[in-house]
Image (spheres, rainbow, N blue to C red):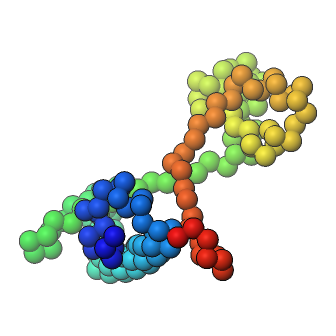
Amino acid sequence: MTTLTLDHLLTIPLVDLSAYSSCALFELKNEAADRLTKAKAIAEHIDSAVDTKYAQRAQILRLAAGKDTGVVHFDDGRVRITADLPKKIEWDQKKMTDIVRRITASGEDPTQYVEIKYRVSETKFNAWPEVFRSTFTPARTLKTGKPDFRLALTDSQGDQ
């Protein structure tokens, strides 16, 4: 096998790449993670510069349009700037619970006004007695996410 670098890594078929030693894969994964961290820091730095350059102008345009949030467009030379300041609404869960109780107590259906979502902590679910857990099991669906493998070097010279 030839020396593998990140610069031509994507040209290597997965079957061939998986044949490399665990140490080689470890080094590649670490180098890729380092590059990704640096690239994210660079992108964030550029984003901060863009924000510094255009935030005030975007805010002035939003105020002129009578809005605090949302999208505004403007040009800077040959570049079209689209500035989006999205709304992020958070609801106080304790207060919402009290409101739902009042709606229910007045004889109304709270689902006509609010979305209600039930969740159970997996840690709590696993700690429940079986008799209680079996009541909830039909409502529980287990889905899996993307597999993740972490590579770490050990002191031993095992499988290479």
User: Would residue 73 appear left or right of 98 to someone viewing this image?
Assistant: left
Count up the numbered dots.
0
Q: Position of residue 148 (x, y in %)?
A: 54, 56
* Res 78 quadrant in image: bottom left
At 26% from the left and 70% from the top, the residue drawn is 8
Q: Nearer the viewer, residue 67 or 91?
A: 91
Query: Can see residue 1?
Result: yes
Query: Can see residue 68?
Result: no
At 57% from the left and 67% from the top, the residue drawn is 159
User: Would residue 69 appear left or right of 128 to someone viewing this image?
Assistant: left
Name the residue at the top extreme: 107
At 37% from the left and 61% from the top, the residue drawn is 17
Q: Nearer the viewer, residue 47 or 26?
A: 26
Name the residue at the left extreme: 78
Q: Identify whether 135 is placed above or below 100.
A: above
Q: Nearer the viewer, residue 10 or 138?
A: 10
